[in-house]
Amino acid sequence: MTIQEWFDKRKEAQIERRAKEMRGIEDASPSLWIKCVHCEAQILKTELEDNMMVCPHCDYHFRINAKTRVSQLLDEGSFEEFFKNILPTDPLKFVDSESYADRLKKAQDKTGLDEAVITGIGKIEGHKIAIAVMDFDYMGGSMGSVVGEKVTRMMEKAIELKIPMLSVTSSGGARMQESALSLMQMAKTSCAAGKLDEAGVLYINLLTEPTFGGVTASFGTLGDIIIAEQGARIGFAGRRVIEQTIHQKLPSDFQTAEYLLKYGQVDIVSKRKNLRKTIANILDMHGV
Amino acid sequence: MGFNMAVLEFEKPIVEIEKKINELKKMSAESGLDMEKQIKTFEKQAQDYKKELYSKLKPSQKLQIARHQERPKFVEFVDLICEDFIELHGDREGLDDRAIAGGLAKFEGKPVMIIGIQKGRTTKENLDCNFGMPQPQGYRKALRLFKHANKFNLPIITLIDTPGAYPGIKAEETGQGMAIATNLREMSKLDVPVISIITGEGCSGGALGLAVANRVMMFEHAYYTVISPEGCASILWRDAALYAEAAEALKITSADLLKLGIIDEEIKEPLGGAHIDYRGAAKNMKNAISKALKELSKLSPEELKEERYNKFRAMGQFIEG
Ligand SMILES: [Zn+2]
């Protein structure tokens, strides 16, 4: 499918949804409206969706889940999911105010996902790519054994098939409920990224709102090219932890994609609507 | 136990008994009465009590020993297990992070690269090395030394004692996460033996950034965790004061981590902890390193790399449906 066809498809969907929306307005259902967290404008939910979950008034990029991300980035119908059979367990029988087993169940019910990452193969403007997309709604996108294993297997698949790898991160960091096993996923995924590197496979990181802790300090930033989505907050330590440590107020744009670009930590900051094209161009220039 | 040393709450009964024994000895000397038998009995009781106490420490108590102000530091271990240490400084990009130190040294007569996280004891020392919290430049210095060791075929020993990588403005601006990530990746590619020892605190990615090793060892009362028990308690229990519960749940002790396959070996500490007897602790460490180096010297560069990779590749627990 060409980009034009893709946009045409989106337009069709848009018209269809507009029609639904008109019916919805007649019902005067309040859930049809979403308040922009940035400019506080009331936006029609469908209008927001048609605009890739970006506020049409102030360009604020709403956080999106993994499924939406996959549908926005990949050619329609091109995605084939891999490693869906890797499922979480509760190795430490971890219980805090709630048991880990219950938290997993809740996260699965909330997101319809088995774990905090979707992995598979798809196409971006015809370029075949291995992809791992994290979902923040699933326990804060935290990395436990399953996330580590799926990301690692996807990298191994990319090497096997000689196709580029793309990671899309959205994570608060490590999965505390798996403790040291979670910590070791940082080592595992980074070692796998080393294999990608040695195999000469192009590895692209897309950092999205928010990417922190163990994911920033492992596979999330080991790409050959690092792209950050506009407005995303990215860092190692959380803002609150830093403020408590240094007893100092931080600049308001601290740890934003734009801030990191200024300090040389990312290659590109991109608006959501340009991501597909940008990645496709990069793939094109690497002949993959 | 030295009476001038900071005494931990659970150690107080021991201090009391030892005080009484000393009084008895003094009394015996002054009065000329033969109390030797009585003293011997008390000493044995004290020793038994100590053994019992230290074999059953709770994770939160080990935490206190691991963080003990008098716990031996990197420089002291280097002094006790190596000869002719030549420190190598700087990341070559503008900083010499004092939280990580490293250099060439002789271990049992053979050259090695030894790198470790530094903590201080006085306020001045602690400010100098940032309380053992490295900045990206520290990890990059370590990486430079890893590569040097790799080039000249020197085994690498890392000693880890950190509450975590430094959470600061400059650290974020200069890529704290990426610096750690790069070390994890690059350590997996090394062709030389790598041995890492958690000597005190092994907290989160800041510790792991020096610990992708063929052999990961840990002192008996050290702790190794994805997040500090206090941090975990404040997030999951919404109260940092409940850190003892978090310490329990996180499975941070050498015994637990050995069972989980996270570490390869536990190094015993002298009774009462490494801070009671530096030489005893260093001797045990030296023996463990010596044994591991002998085993690893049998492997080819390719095998060393592969063994290390496979070990970390296999980490994690999940269901394959
Ligand atoms: Zn807005």
Image: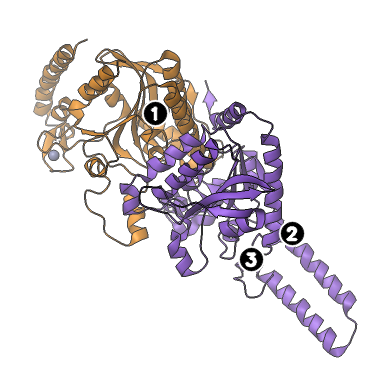
Q: Quadrant of the N terminus of chain B?
A: bottom right
Q: How crowded is mark 3: few (under 14 residues within 10 Å), some or many (20 or more)?
A: few
Q: In this view, does A112 lie to the left or right of A254?
A: right
Give the residue at x 80% y 67%: B45
> Is there a contact, CB below 8 Å, between mark 1 and mark 3?
no
Q: Distance between the residues labelled 2 and 1?
A: 46 Å
Rendered colour, chain B: purple
Coordinates of residue A174 in the picture (x, y in percent): 44, 40
Q: How crowded is mark 1: few (under 14 residues within 10 Å), some or many (20 or more)?
A: many
Callout 3, which amino acid? Phe
**B1 versus B32 height, above or below:** above
**Residue sticking out furthest to the top:** A1
Q: Name the residue under label 2.
A: B52
Q: Are marks 2 and 3 on the same chain?
A: yes
Write down the quadrant of residue B24 in the picture. bottom right
Q: Quadrant of ligand 1?
A: top left
Q: How far apart are marks 2 and 3 (CA)?
A: 12 Å
Rendered colour, chain A: orange
Under circle 1, the secondary element is strand
Q: Mark 1 points at which residue?
A: A117
Under circle 2, the secondary element is helix
Q: Which of marks 2 and 3 is nearer the N terminus?
A: 3
Count of marks, rendered view: 3
Coordinates of residue B59 in the picture (x, y in percent): 60, 54
Q: In this view, does B119 lie to the left or right of B292?
A: left
Give the residue at x 46% y 39%: B183
What subunit carries mark 3?
A: B
Coordinates of residue A197 in the picture (x, y in percent): 42, 26
Q: Which of B68 and A222 is in front in this view?
A: A222
Q: Which of B114 and B43 is in front in this view?
A: B114
Under circle 3, the secondary element is helix
Q: Nearer the viewer, residue A80 or B267?
A: B267
